Image (cartoon, rainbow, N blue to C red):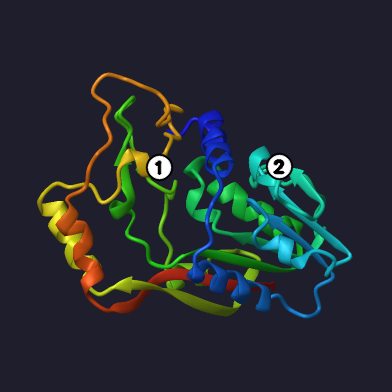
Amino acid sequence: MVKMDCYDEFYDQVYSVGRRFSDEERNRIMTIIQMIPNDVDSLLEVGCGDGRIINNLKNKYENICGMDISNEALKNVKTPKIKGRIENIPFPDNSFDIVLCSEVLEHLPNTIYEKALKELQRVANKYILITVPNEENLQIGNVKCPQCASSFHVYGHLRSFSLLHMKDLFEFFGLVDFEIVLNDVYVLDDLVIKIKKWLKIDIFTFEDAKSCPKCGFTVSHKINGFNNTKKPYLIERLPFQFPMKKSGGWIIALYVKK
């Protein structure tokens, strides 16, 4: 069970050190913006993070707001903003023409996931626009906390989505449009992952996660036996010797009220 105070602190920690943009993420953000329908006058982004999407929409809508659980993230948001939780969105029913929720649902614990889906539907007047990772293998991202020995996903992901799953995501909103934005990955990535599993080498280490969402332990803490894990050089360099392919990425799905 994820402790909610540690869960919140996990994201404050993530945003306090900053997050980089990849070319693939820039492509994802532009695709999201292009999928917003023209008949939208008001927009709420739930889980807006550091504003990397909503900041591009500043002054475009008469009523616009970004919402997030992280104070650190909200410091970078340039539109009107509010701290709030997705399972209890602090707005009346049908408050916004469109509710945008990008890279959030995969992070939600089971205790709030269904509540979150209902809340998104409640405050959306016309549309909901969702993005989630595309057919992610969650096992690849697992790391172990050296303090409490709990396993968790390096990016805090708790569930995986496919396009089939996205079609029936909401009760009162139907899927009307979607895009799949693929990542560039090396053709040998899958082979390297298999080799690492066979050799019992972690794909990621706790240092990649930086903190534990279950007990709050961070890489700045010192405990007996906690050392940085070195990854074998040859195995790490192997994929870079071969061409790229398209894989994974994100599903961007637009829903309209039924």
Question: Badge 1: how crowded within 10 Å, few (<14), some, or many (20+)?
Answer: many
Which residue is rendered at x = 76% and y = 67% of the image?
57
The answer to whether residue 198 is above or below residue 87 is: below
Horizontal side of 213 relative to 257 (left or right) equals left
Report how many numbered discs are placed on residues in the image.
Answer: 2
> Which disc number belongs to residue 209?
1
| Mark 2 residue type | Gly
Q: Position of residue 257 (x, y in %)?
A: 71, 71
Q: Say left or right for 163 vs 136.
A: right
Residue bearing the label numbered 2 = 84
Under circle 2, the secondary element is: loop
Residue 170, above or below 177: above
Tell me if 116 is positioned left or right of 168 in this view. right
Tell me what residue is drawn at x 45 percent, y 67 percent: 165
Q: What residue type is labelled 1?
A: Ala
- Quarter of the image for residue 146 reads top left
229 or 148, which is in the foreground? 229
Q: Do the residues labelled 2 and 1 touch (CB within 8 Å)?
A: no
Give the class, few, some or many, for how many residues have Cα within 10 Å of label 2's Cα (few <14, many ≥20): some
